[in-house]
Image (cartoon, rainbow, N blue to C red):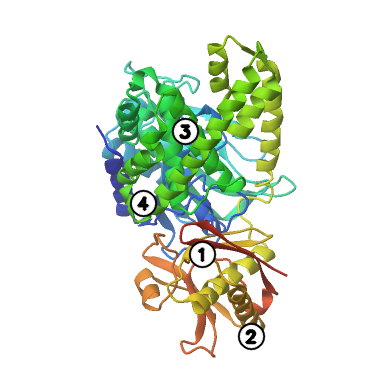
Amino acid sequence: MITRENLIKSYLEFFKSKDHKIIPSASLVPENDPTVLFTTAGMHPLVPYLLGQSHPLGTRLVNVQKCLRTGDINQIGNSTHHTFFEMLGNWSLGDYWKKESIKYSFEFLTKILKIPKDKLAVSVFEGDINSPKDTESAQAWQKLGMPKSRIAFLGKEDNWWGPAGQTGPCGPDTEIFFWSSNKKAPSTFNPKDKNWVEIWNNVFMEYEKTKESKYLPLKQKNVDTGMGVERTLAVLNNLQDNYESPSFTPLIEVIEEISGKDYSECKREMRIIADHIRAAVFLAADGVIPSNIEQGYVLRRLIRRAIVYSKKLNIPSNKSLTKILSETCIDIYSNYGLDKKRRVIEQVLSEEENKFEKTLSIGLREFEKLSKNSSRIEGKEAFLLFQSYGFPIELTEELANEKNIKIDKESFNEEYKKHQDLSKSLSSGMFKSGLADNSEQTTRLHTATHLLNEALRKVLGPEVKQRGSNITPERLRFDFNFPRKLTEEEIKHVESLINEKISQNLKVVREEISYKEALKQEAQAEFGHKYPEKVSVYTILDDREKKKWFSKEICTGPHVQNTSQIGKFKIIKEESVAAGIRRIKAIVS
């Protein structure tokens, strides 16, 4: 059995041998991208560099990136969908192009992973009025020995990536497929045959889509590739079920043990529980707290949905489901340093579990009221149980069947569709401004965050460390470690110090140095965050300071050139988000 660790190690070492520099995984919560809730692909943290900014480690990069997608959360439970997943990726930032990218992919698959050539097929872009047929990629594949009959030309819906928003970088891609059946692969590639499973995607960003829907050639052409760890492990180990791969089997075994049931009899329930708790662990590790908005709402929904399905397996509440499974996740994914955040992860998940146990009891009592002396539950009532108490319709149906009560499923679906339409409209708003927001307002807030970080250290003490941040055009959000609520005097002192530095017209400079040198220079780094061997450091100069700088942080930007560009700084809220973790929200005007 090929393990997760072996696959990741082989991938990173292969591309390292091709002069790629290994970069660490970014947080699931994009630091400077208010257009998306989560990091959904390896390229998200690299947007500034894909748009032309030079990367400290050069033009060839590789990593394994943790990702999270919630668009198809209701499909979780089948054999292939996941909320959280790992993506192997390698990038060329204006360096090599299609021929080299395809050659590297083919070499890794056939020589390193030992996949027989006759089990592979590819698709390429067939061309349209905006971009020509991608004969360059097709020819590159043929030179490597791929038969013409195994190369399919497909349209934009299949072989085109982006842009992520209405405008931005985009281009054709070539997808690589593996024949998953034990039967001999057919000589001709039929993309509609489900035995052909996509395992790798090479995107060639060579255009920029404008507001006028024109496709202009990019000055810097980039290669962006992606290979899902879970899917690849299933394929390489000849598994039809991703949840039987090494990424999930330890979790499934724990669920079997505490439920007393076999996976083969309860696949859907166990997949949902394993998937959702795994995703919840990584969100909590990246500083997300359960709430009713944005990232916190997603985390709350994942935890609660997992608990509801644990009830269907008759797992008692005294088993501490989230604690047991989070411990297993932390052990599986040791490469992300989750052990250092074990206490916080377990606290966040267990607190939400305990809260929901109480809500669940109330929901069950509400069901009893609705079903008492009744032969029918209306759609609105069933939707109330879903929306207010987290009951999936399947659970309500099961409870109703026990009492021989019918549910107005059609009416429920109507209510649910209204809810989905509203959610989609709200979600789509996250993407309207494109892939990343480097607007003037966001840039001002970003530099203000650096001032806030240092001001807190000066007012509260040097032990204060950043634990996460999020910036939108409207406000900044900054999490830091501190054991108590800030006093009014402390908040005013922090505000006053920041506005003083803004009025002093301090210069902001950027340099690229080694990570070790950055720490030697006392540059601030986010707690628990992994950094590459070479980093960008932004310094806010100040001749009034003994060190001749006020703030020095490892960061990717963007920033103003002078603090006078920020405007007036105002803290609008200070609150607790977890034990020992405080959060400040602030604006500039």
Question: Is residue 311 at all visible to an observer of this figure?
Answer: yes
Residue 22 in the image: state x and y as whole percent: 36, 56
Which sits earlier in the primary sequence, circle 4 or circle 2? 4
Q: Going by the image, does 83 lie left or right of 386? A: left
The answer for how far apart the CA atoms under marks 4 and 1 are is 28 Å
Rendered image quadrant of residue 102 = top left
First of labels 2, 3 by sequence position? 3
In this figure, which residue is indicated by the disc labeled 3?
A: 306
Label 3: element kind: helix
- CA gap, disc 3 to disc 1? 36 Å
The image shows a total of numbered marks equal to: 4
Amino acid type, mark 3: Ala
Q: Nearer the viewer, residue 532 or 211?
A: 532
The Cα atoms of the two marked residues, 4 and 2, are separated by 42 Å
Q: Please name the residue shown 27% across and 37% down the image.
A: 3
Q: Nearer the viewer, mark 4 or mark 2?
A: 4
Q: Which residue is mark 2?
A: 504
Q: Earlier in the sequence, mark 3 or mark 1?
A: 3
- The answer to whether residue 528 is above or below residue 366 is below
* Residue 130 drawn at (x, y percent): 66, 40
Measure how far apart labels 4 and 3 are at the Cα level: 20 Å
Quadrant containing the N terminus is top left
Instruction: Count residues near mark 4 (Cα–Cα under 10 Å), then give few for <14, some for 14-19, many for 20+.
Output: some
Disc 1 target residue: 556
Q: Earlier in the sequence, mark 4 or mark 1?
A: 4
For disc 4, the marked residue is: 342
Q: Verify CB contact (< 8 Å) between mark 4 and mark 1.
A: no
Query: The disc labelled 2 sits on which kind of residue?
Result: Gln
